[in-house]
């Protein structure tokens, strides 16, 4: 049986082959098949790493930035982004086991090459690298930020020696060049998978964030608390947008939200009262460090470097301020006078020597859940943090172009893509295909019950480790095909009671149609939309049979209640030998 890492590597290779391989220059690689595959995958990882730090780029441009070769001097890709004022430098490594790590010599060689780039020793690098020489000259003169990235398809455990080398180089670079001039980024297999499944999931490091009237807490969780000004928050939104909210249970709820309208009204009309009217912002960080200039005896203002920031409460505050700034309704001058309460909590804590990653995740999740009460939060929102949902999002993203959205966010799109699947789509489709009287009845009467307990039997009967990305995609596509016909049938019914049967019996009708085509739902691969069978005859026959039965035995029954009654559903399904 294949391990989870082998499956992850297979999925990564498949994704890289589909999205990058045709754009990669392999002219300097020999003809040996194993060498070509290793080099191709390594170069594809380099291209993906450029994309990681420059998400707006096309895959072809990322692939063209690859400069890997026997004469590359330790740099596999380079890209100068003049819009973002950044230089991304990449060393990549393909590990077919998914468990490998970075060696001392590997990280040392790469960081030494990075220092030579900073010293403008471009002649040490190959011709493909030197295509960027004029761009690098401009970047150097304009003080762009350098992002040094070592990317590999291995595990997330770095040796103590490697961590020490990275930290020493980080301190040296910050001291010699400046605190905001360079960043060292390490990307492993899990980071790459997270990014592929959700490009908004990149790590956000912020340097020299000014916190006013700050205080420090040490136990049980280290934290910085104080005040940030509105102009700082506006620029967070301008630079990162919804990516700030990756660990939150949802994104921004849009301008139509009553709470967001109130936030905007205070911001524009009574900015001096914003601090008193607003709940503030809570942010999780992996770590933080005070700036050297901070005076521990005077805390009116202090600068802090925060690693891997993610807002877990205050999404509405940040998005509203950011949008007001971008629209011109709130200027930098106005926002600099707006004060917002803010907490930065270090959630990666080991309280004992044998603490595990699971312990850390539990701390983050507990903080996230406890802090979300500014807008109405539903049980379904909390499901967005369930590991099963997160894994489905990852695995579905590898079935390109399908995407799985697990967060409730802005108002639904008028014409959503057929390749976008959300949690409600999955719930409807899986309940209909995994035939259960109880689940069908609950889906009709109170769908919220499925999310009341993420460890309870009702939720687990639908979302559990046995559910694959392929099953979700195929089930949702069948569900949508059936639903489209039922919506048409609903409009053409001339008898109101028959129309009510279509409306309130849709889950039953769709489950009957699904039961007639088990080969689709049990398929090991995604079935294209054009290859799905015609479900209309099955649906029409089922509708006629159910209508006749109800007219004969339950002519006076109330249709909404009828399809919520498990005993009556049992009678209906018996008509179809289910």
Image (cartoon, grey):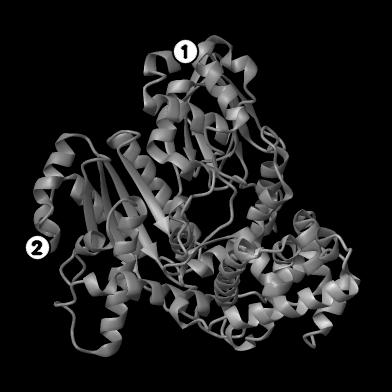
The answer to whether residue 421 is above or below residue 571 is: above
Q: Which of 280 and 557 is in front in this view?
A: 557
The residue tagged 1 is 337
Res 127 label: 2
Q: Image quarter for residue 497?
A: bottom right
- The answer to whether 451 appears left or right of 523 in the picture is right
Q: Residue at x 73, y 40 (%)?
A: 370
Q: Residue at x 27, y 84 (%)?
A: 35
- Residue 426: percent from the left, percent from the top? 62, 65
Q: Image quarter for residue 565?
A: bottom right
- The answer to whether 509 appears left or right of 231 in the picture is right
Q: Residue at x 38, y 37 (%)?
A: 239
Judging from the image, what secondary structure is the residue with disc 2 in? helix
Q: Image quarter for residue 335?
A: top left
Q: Nearer the viewer, residue 1 or 447?
A: 447
Res 525 label: none
- Residue 156: percent from the left, percent from the top? 51, 63
Discs 1, 2 touching: Cβ within 8 Å: no
Query: Residue most toward the front?
Result: 494
Q: How crowded is mark 1: few (under 14 residues within 10 Å), some or many (20 or more)?
A: some
Give the distance between the C-alpha atoms of the residues marked 1 and 2, in whole angstroms. 51 Å
Q: Which residue is drawn at 22% across and 70% down?
A: 23
- Residue 265: percent from the left, percent from the top? 54, 18
């Amino acid at each position: 049986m294949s391990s989870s890492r082998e499956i992850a590597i297979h999925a990564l290779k498949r994704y890289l082959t589909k999205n990058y391989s045709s754009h990669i220059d392999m002219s300097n690689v020999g003809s040996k098949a194993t060498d070509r595959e290793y080099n191709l995958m390594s170069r594809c990882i380099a291209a993906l790493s450029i994309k990681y730090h420059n998400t707006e780029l096309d895959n072809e441009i990322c692939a063209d930035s690859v400069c890997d070769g026997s004469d590359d001097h330790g740099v596999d890709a380079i890209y100068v982004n003049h819009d973002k004022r950044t230089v991304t430098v990449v060393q990549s490594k393909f590990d077919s086991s998914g468990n490998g790590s970075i060696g001392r010599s590997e990280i040392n060689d790469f960081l030494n090459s990075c220092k030579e780039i900073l010293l403008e020793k471009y002649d040490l690098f190959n011709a493909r690298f030197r295509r960027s020489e004029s761009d690098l000259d401009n970047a150097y003169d304009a003080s762009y930020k350098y992002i040094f990235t070592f990317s590999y398809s291995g595990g997330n455990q770095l040796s103590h020696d490697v961590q020490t080398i990275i930290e020493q180089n980080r301190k040296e670079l910050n001291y010699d060049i400046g605190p905001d001039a360079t960043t060292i980024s390490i990307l492993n297999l899990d980071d790459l998978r997270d990014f592929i499944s959700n490009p908004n999931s990149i790590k956000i490091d912020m340097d020299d964030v000014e916190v006013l009237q700050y205080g420090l807490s040490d136990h049980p969780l280290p934290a910085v608390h104080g005040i940030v000004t509105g102009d700082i928050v506006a620029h967070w939104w301008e630079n990162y947008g919804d990516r700030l909210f990756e660990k939150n249970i949802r994104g921004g709820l849009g301008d139509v939200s009553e709470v967001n309208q109130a936030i905007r009204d205070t911001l524009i009309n009574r900015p001096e009262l914003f601090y008193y009217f607003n709940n503030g912002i809570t942010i999780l960080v992996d770590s933080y460090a005070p700036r050297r200039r901070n005076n521990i005896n005077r805390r009116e203002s202090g600068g802090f470097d925060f690693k891997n920031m993610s807002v877990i409460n205050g999404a509405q505050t940040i998005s509203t301020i950011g949008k007001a700034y971008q629209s011109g309704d709130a200027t930098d001058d106005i926002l600099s006078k707006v004060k917002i309460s803010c907490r930065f909590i270090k959630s990666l804590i080991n309280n004992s020597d044998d603490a595990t990653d699971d312990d850390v995740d539990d701390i983050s999740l507990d903080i996230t859940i406890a802090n979300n009460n500014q807008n109405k939060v539903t049980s379904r929102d909390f499901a967005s943090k369930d590991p099963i949902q997160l894994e489905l999002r990852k695995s579905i993203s590898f079935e390109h172009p399908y995407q799985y959205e697990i967060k409730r966010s802005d108002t639904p799109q008028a014409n959503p893509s057929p390749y976008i699947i959300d949690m409600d789509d999955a719930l409807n489709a899986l309940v209909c295909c995994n035939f259960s009287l109880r689940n069908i009845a609950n889906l009709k009467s109170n769908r919220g019950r499925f999310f009341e307990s993420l460890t309870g039997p009702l939720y687990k009967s639908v979302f559990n480790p046995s559910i694959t990305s392929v099953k979700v995609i195929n089930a949702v596509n069948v569900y949508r095909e059936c639903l489209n016909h039922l919506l048409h049938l609903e409009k053409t019914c001339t008898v109101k009671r028959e129309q009510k049967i279509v409306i309130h019996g849709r889950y039953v009708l769709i489950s009957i149609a699904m039961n007639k085509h088990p080969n689709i739902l049990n398929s090991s691969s995604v079935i294209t939309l054009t290859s799905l069978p015609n479900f209309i005859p099955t649906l029409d026959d089922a509708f006629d049979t159910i209508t006749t039965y109800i007219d004969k035995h339950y002519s006076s029954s109330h249709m909404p209640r009828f399809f919520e009654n498990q005993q009556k559903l049992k009678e209906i399904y018996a008509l179809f030998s289910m």
